[in-house]
Image: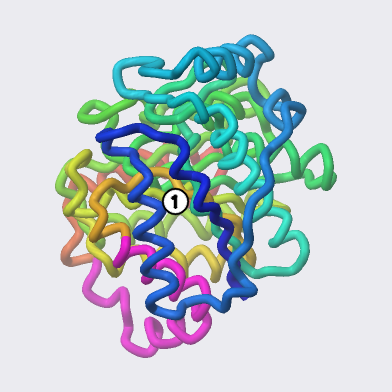
Amino acid sequence: MTAVVYSEDYSLHDTGNHVENEMRVQVIMQAIKEMGLLDIKDIYRPNKATKEDLLRVHTKEQVEYIQKFCLNGGGYIDFDTAASPQSYEIAKLSAGGAIKAAQLVVDGYESAYSIGRPPGHHATRNKAMGFCLFNNLAITLEYLREIKNIKKFLVFDFDVHYGNGTADIFYEDPDVLYISIHQDPKTIFPGKGFIHEIGSELGEGANLNIPMPPGSTNYDYIYILDKILGPAAEKFDADFYLVDVGFDGHKDDPLSSINLDDQFYQWISVELMDIAESLTLILEGGYDLNALSRCNKNLINGLKNYKIINEEYEKNNQDSNIDSRVRNQTKKIYQDIKETFSPYFDL
């Protein structure tokens, strides 16, 4: 079973003509309803995260700063991160949507997907940035750790931008394996997420970055993820899987130079379900509305029907032509990752 968490109130985080605007989540929900992908009983409304939820991750000063900034009328927190008078409350709702999705998985759903905004994975403990006010995934993880007593987490982030906030928050945490595939940080915001950034202290080896060169396609992504995700997940043996979902790696997206197509998003959902058996997914980026609509259909279809689709992939020998179409750059990245992480994982 697959569930979705959504609220029409996300439009109250009013960013005007900003690329991260209310239409993003509206077109996703419209596509879900028009295609009949989910029964109405599987669409849930979120509750707002509490201040206590926020403070498990963010500093008191940061939470109060965002609250006061919005109460004073909002504006631009930095050069690209906008907030309106109601954005503090809606950011709590977005974090609460992620928590609600995780609760649904704890209660028996195979997958649950929080289609919320503002997004979160760039927000650090003490700073909002990159369109993000609070870190929805980190807030959810710490809720699960404290309230549900869950011990070990695998976080996979396939937004085209490195989730620097999430990575930084858990950089020294041995119980959170953070794996991110993203465009080469030499070519895109936030300029972090290189292979050598592997975590520190007790968390050394638990931050695994896959920086992909501009122009990478489905073949490059599937080649490298197939070699890394399964072995790392098996070795780490997490109790709970959280996924930051980004559609800005699509070839039509205006903010990146990665060339994924619609079919990648079905493949990755099937691959993750085959590895994890249950997933909590949280929306991050994706800024071409038509691509968002189509790719979310594929993602949810993959979540719902992963067993059938996986059998079709195997029957049709899905991976048979991948090696010959993968760029040498991608193969070199895989070898660099394999060597770097050899003390921690057999990839």
As drawn, is 93 to the left or to the right of 81? right
Residue 322 versus residue 243: which sits nearer the camera?
243
Residue range of the region highlighted in magenta in the rendering: 293-322
As drawn, is 160 to the left or to the right of 12? left
Could you tell me which residue is drawn at 34 percent across and 41 percent down?
21
Q: Please say if 217 is above or below 320.
A: above
Residue 344 versus residue 158: which sits nearer the camera?
158
Could you tell me which residue is drawn at 16 percent across and 64 percent down?
325
Q: Please say if 9 is above or below 227.
A: above
Q: Please say if 75 is above or below 122.
A: above
Q: Is residue 185 magenta?
A: no
Q: Quadrant of residue 340?
A: top left
Q: Please say if 233 is above or below 278.
A: above
What x and y, as percent, mark residue 14?
40, 34
Q: Is residue 127 visible?
A: yes
In the displayed orientation, state which residue is furthest to the bottom.
Answer: 315
Callout 1 secondary element: strand
Q: Is residue 311 magenta?
A: yes
Residue occupied by mark 1: 245
What x and y, as percent, mark residue 57?
66, 26
- Secondary structure mostly seen in magenta is helix
